[in-house]
Image (spheres, rainbow, N blue to C red):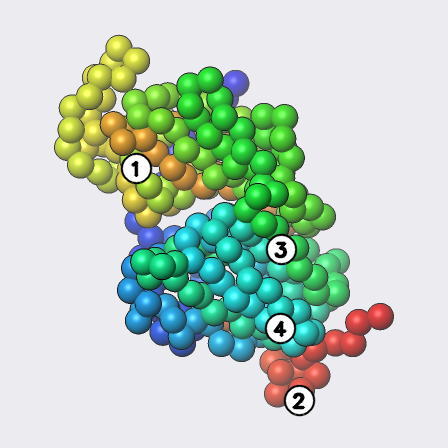
């Protein structure tokens, strides 16, 4: 096995989107080659409905796929094709915007007012930029979970892992999307494809990944597997970890355990022309999309 060293770590940055939704952005509108085929990742988490209730009103998408994973609260969605639905706790939606769609996403908190979810954007290859839009709405009850002997829990949202297959399929980037919980003071390794871009996003607890650089955390001394581990070197809440090449990712959890998303995808290695929620391959295609929006021809008839 070849362990993947950490290429970089950084904290997600606060920002505002939609009609006034306060969220944290781990990456987005950056160099699209860095995590190809992934373009953007947002963590929308808040306990105050005033900071998210106005949601994400009607807006367009073309040329990408959006992946929404809800942990707390609900997200009601609707689109220009007449689709309607509600994502509940533990559920996921994979939306292929393809040739173009207008949609809205309206979050609603749980009984305590808490809202928590993630949205990831994945690019589409040139051959599928203008494919017909489609949805995959998956209930939390349909996502398999694997529990290892040491208490490590993995929800397999997309891809194959530990003998289970996630329910989302037919995705161009052939990704793997895992929700991983590692119990306190445990070292655990996870196999990943050598030729894919891989990132982890920590959203609960803390831990350290092999060869981590510029970590974040609190100062607590703890012995793990016979070795002294200084918890001030642990990466914590809302930290994005990008990995270099290798076929295995290793994490050592802190005294409170760690929960993180582990996401990988096959690079498309294609040119990117990007403006907001529209991602094409050339500036000419991008100009055409803008013209379609102005002319009312953005939504294509599907046969």
Q: Quadrant of residue 289?
A: bottom right
Which residue in the protein does label 3 denote?
137
Which residue in the protein does label 2 denote?
295
Of discs 4 and 2, which sits in the foreground?
4
Q: CA distance from mark 3 to mark 1?
A: 29 Å
* SS at badge 1: strand
Q: Earlier in the sequence, mark 3 or mark 1?
A: 3
The answer to whether any part of residue 195 appears in the image is: no
Looking at the image, residue 73 lies above or below residue 8: below
50 on left or right of 149: left
Of discs 3 and 1, which sits in the foreground?
3
Contact, mark 4 vs mark 1 (Cβ under 8 Å): no
* SS at badge 2: helix
Image quarter in which the C terminus is found = bottom right
Image coords of residue 68 (percent x, y): 52, 56
Contact, mark 4 vs mark 2 (Cβ under 8 Å): no
Q: Earlier in the sequence, mark 4 or mark 1?
A: 4
Q: CA distance from mark 4 to mark 1?
A: 36 Å
Q: Which mark is residue 79?
A: 4
Q: CA distance from mark 3 to mark 4?
A: 14 Å
The answer to whether any part of residue 114 appears in the image is: yes
Q: Which mark is residue 205?
A: 1
Q: CA distance from mark 1 to mark 2?
A: 49 Å
Q: Earlier in the sequence, mark 3 or mark 4?
A: 4
Q: CA distance from mark 3 to mark 2?
A: 31 Å
**Toward the viewer: 107 or 260?**
107
């Amino acid at each position: 096995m070849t362990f993947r060293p950490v290429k970089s770590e950084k904290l997600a940055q606060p920002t505002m989107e939609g009609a006034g939704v306060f969220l944290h952005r781990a990456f987005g509108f950056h160099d699209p080659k860095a995590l190809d085929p992934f373009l953007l990742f947002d963590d929308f988490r808040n306990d105050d409905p005033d900071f998210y209730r106005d949601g994400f009103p009607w807006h367009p998408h073309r040329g990408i796929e959006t992946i929404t994973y809800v942990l707390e609260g609900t997200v009601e969605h609707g689109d220009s094709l007449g689709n309607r639905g509600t994502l509940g706790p533990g559920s996921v939606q994979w939306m292929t915007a393809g040739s173009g769609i207008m949609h809205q996403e309206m979050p609603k908190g749980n009984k305590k007012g808490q809202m928590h979810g993630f949205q990831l954007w994945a690019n589409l290859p040139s051959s599928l930029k203008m494919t017909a839009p489609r949805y995959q709405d998956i209930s939390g009850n349909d996502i398999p979970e694997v529990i290892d002997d040491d208490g490590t829990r993995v929800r397999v949202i997309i891809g194959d892992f530990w003998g289970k297959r996630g329910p989302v399929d037919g995705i161009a980037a052939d990704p793997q999307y895992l929700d991983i919980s590692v119990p306190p003071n445990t070292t655990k390794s996870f196999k990943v494809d050598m030729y894919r871009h891989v990132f982890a996003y920590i959203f609960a607890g803390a831990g350290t990944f092999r060869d981590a650089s510029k970590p974040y955390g609190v100062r607590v001394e703890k012995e793990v597997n016979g070795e002294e581990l200084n918890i001030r070197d642990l990466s914590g809440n809302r930290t994005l970890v990008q990995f270099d090449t290798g076929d295995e990712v290793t994490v050592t959890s802190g005294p409170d355990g760690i929960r993180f998303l582990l996401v990988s995808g096959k690079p498309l290695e294609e040119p990117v022309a990007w403006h907001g929620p529209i991602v094409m391959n050339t500036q000419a295609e991008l100009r055409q999309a803008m013209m379609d929006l102005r002319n009312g021809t953005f939504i294509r008839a599907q046969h």
